[in-house]
Image (spheres, helix red, strand yellow):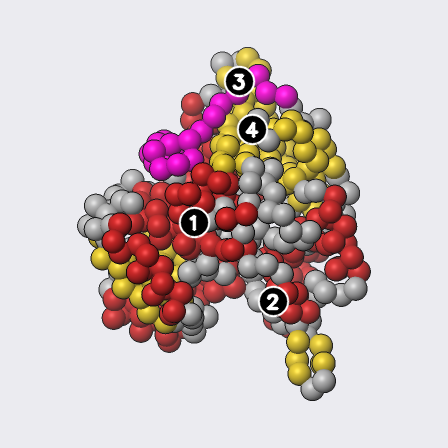
Amino acid sequence: MARVIVIGCGGVATVGISKCCQVPEVFTDLCIASRTKEKCDALAAKLAPTTKTRITTTKVDAGNLDEMIALLQSYKPDMVLHLGLPYHNLVIMEACVRCKVNYLDTAAYEPEDVNDPEFRKYYDKRCQEKGFYAYFDYPFQWAYRKKFEEAGVTAVLGCGFDPGVTQAYVAYAKKHYFDTIDTLDILDCNGGDHGYKFATNFNPEINLREVSSPAAYWEDHKWHRVEAMTVKKEYNFDGVGEKDMYLLHHEEIESLGLNYPEIKRIRFFMTFGQSYLEHMRCLEDVGMLSTKAINYHGMEIVPIQFLKALLPDPATLGARTKGKTNIGCIFTGKKDGKEVHYYIYNVCDHQESYREVGSQAISYTTGTPAMCGAMMVLTGKWNKPGVYNVEEFDPDPFIDAMNRHGLPIRENFNPVLVD
């Protein structure tokens, strides 16, 4: 039915590719493209005996526009499934527009070099105007709306779990249970244990930038900023137990605040253990989270990139990670004039994820929604020209696909609210 290029061959991409191969009637042809072709070849060899999907591999620098255009022109895909680093979102989107190819990614664009003068000019202006200080946001990609409309192709932004599924949960809740939503709390709990004193469950550069940035939440149609890791709550998560969680800035707040202006307050919380926070604070204090290059014995070294090389590769954590994740949304609002409280979430087991696709649940909960989102576009359920966030589409077929492909919803109509 469809030819798809998958950019990337890390933990999330491995899950996404494996899941595509489970639906060969949709993903008939798949090209795995990465800077490291050997990894692509090894994954293709592993999956080929288990699927009817025809798999090829190639080497590509996704940050090089000419290489991306050449790849799209030669393979002629119906869609690009970008499961690599968000640094390359804009280059890949530009290539897709020029070649009239559908596009999907799992996280908002952010620059690799946050000290680039042009980006700092934009960043400082945005911080002053909007009031949040994370390096990632959507306007760079939203600027492509007209181009994708004119090209007649679809771009789906942030179709992992959070962002992604959490936004589908909002659309689903509004469609089925609410006339108006008053408050939304997005809760991301990882109850897994990989046994290391310190490691990140996805790309260390992205992960550590995200959690060390000043936090922000949306209330009364404006951003409110607080220092990183200063707002702490406790919550008892189904399947995991009681955990400490902290207020963070997260990209889906930005699009949800725009697309659901009725919501008076939107917050995002993520769980962290004390050991993780202590290590992170120490690394930040000594400059290891810096993105600014330093000269070391005549060599230019970016501290956070050097740290990434020292830490365990997140793609290798699957075999040793035990426990579960719990990610979902808690709503308050009204239906037919009555107060409604509602909690929709998913519980995913690390070991079950590893047994199925060889990756831990963090990668599973990102790669699986990406496959389901791509399937929505390719089967025509989400196929409309332009650039969209997940909450702008019909949530029902997507939720149904998630239920069938490993991430079923759970619902609670009397949840404990976050104070």
**Amino acid type at mark 3:** Phe
Residue 379 appears in which quarter of the rendering? top left
Q: Mark 1 or mark 4: which is in front?
A: 1
Read off the residue under disc 1.
358
Nearest to N terminus: mark 1 or mark 4 = 4
Q: Mark 3 or mark 4: which is in front?
A: 4
Is residue 89 left or right of 253 when viewed as pictured?
A: left
User: Does 2 appear above or below 306?
Assistant: above
Q: Secondary structure at mark 3?
A: loop
Nearest to N terminus: mark 3 or mark 1 = 1
Mark 1 crowd level (few <14, some 14–19, many ≥20, 10 Å Cα): many
At 50% from the left and 27% from the top, the residue drawn is: 344
Residue 196 x %, y % = 64, 51
Q: Nearer the viewer, residue 112 or 300?
A: 300
**Amino acid type at mark 2:** Ala
Q: Which mark is residue 309?
A: 2
Read off the residue under disc 4.
239
At 60% from the left and 67% from the top, the residue drawn is: 309
Q: CA distance from mark 1 to mark 4?
A: 22 Å
> Which stretch is magenta?
396-416
Quadrant in the picture for the C terminus: top right
Q: Mark 2 or mark 1: which is in front?
A: 1
